[in-house]
Image: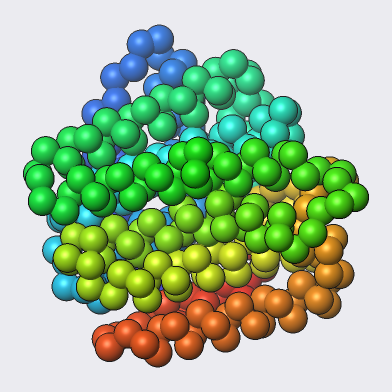
Amino acid sequence: MNDLEYKLSRYAEDFNLILDNFLNGLNCEPKILGESLKYSLSAGGKRIRPAMMFAAGELLHIERSCLEQYALALELIHTYSLIHDDLPEMDNDDFRRGKPSNHKVYGAGNAVLAGDGLLNTAYSILLAQCRKGGNSVSAAEFICDCAGIYGMIAGQSADLLYEADAQADEKMLGFIYANKTAKMLTAPLVVPSILADGKYYSELKLFGMNFGCLFQLTDDILDVEGDFATLGKTAGKDKKGDKCTAVKLFGLEGAKLRADMLADKCLKILNCIDGDTCFFEELVQYVLSRNS
């Protein structure tokens, strides 16, 4: 296990304790609602977003306890988006993280409600944080904006709109990348900055947006080069659905070249931050060469 794998594992373990505490407190009626929430939240994953938030907190000297509920809300929002993304009306995937998708286990209607429940609960958690006053309101608002109609939802809408669009271009692709993926990977960096009175706000936001685009770009590449065993979901779906992706617009090698350029840009931004950014530097290299 290398240093990054160790850190990711440690952050994931820390977060999973927070998540377990949340899950143990769930008492939903009817029972199927709670079961469907727990099914997707417990499906595993690297917990990249909580890990990034905890690492940014350490960089900015923010107490972990001040970030835990924001990280929980962010992961609930992320999980809701995955449940909805797998639905037949969206990306139509029967698997997520190597397990049947929520709608394949509980039905499409219950999957929609599970996603709705996670999103509403995340907002309830963020509202509770707002009671602390100070910068907490701005931190909660930032997450909401990243997840909402000027963020992830807009990106998802554009992703659907530009399917099989012969006029799809780099501008459209940039909009999808920025909103569908990058903003929700920027939030875990910017929230600690907001709580630290804006320290390195511009740098972390810029890094997050470029890192998020890199993450989505490599995801597009993996859809071509990956397989179910490593991805835990169906490969080849972008081409089948005629999605607007970097591979479609620039070809596989062109997409890889752009990934290298984005990675270099991310590392240059990190050089502008006076502090230990090794975790993020290693994370960039990991995403650039990831196979899952």
Vertical comparison of 178 with 113: above or below:
below
Front-most of residues 153 and 54:
153
Vertical comparison of 28 with 189: above or below:
above
Q: Give the x, y percent position of residue 163.
A: 81, 43
Relative to 137, is 49 on the left or the right? Answer: right
Say which quadrant the C terminus sits in.
bottom right
Vertical comparison of 141 with 173: above or below:
above
Residue at the (75%, 77%) spot, across then down:
256
Q: Give the x, y percent position of residue 139.
A: 26, 51
Q: Looking at the image, can residue 15 be seen?
A: yes
Residue at the (85%, 46%) spot, across then down:
165
Residue at the (17%, 66%) spot, across then down:
196
Count of number-bearing discs = 0
Q: Work out which residue is located at the far right of the displayed protein and give it.
A: 166
Front-most of residues 203 and 245:
203
Q: Quadrant of residue 255?
A: bottom right
Residue at the (83%, 64%) spot, across then down:
249
Front-most of residues 122 and 258:
258
Q: Work out which residue is located at the far top of the displayed protein and give it.
A: 30
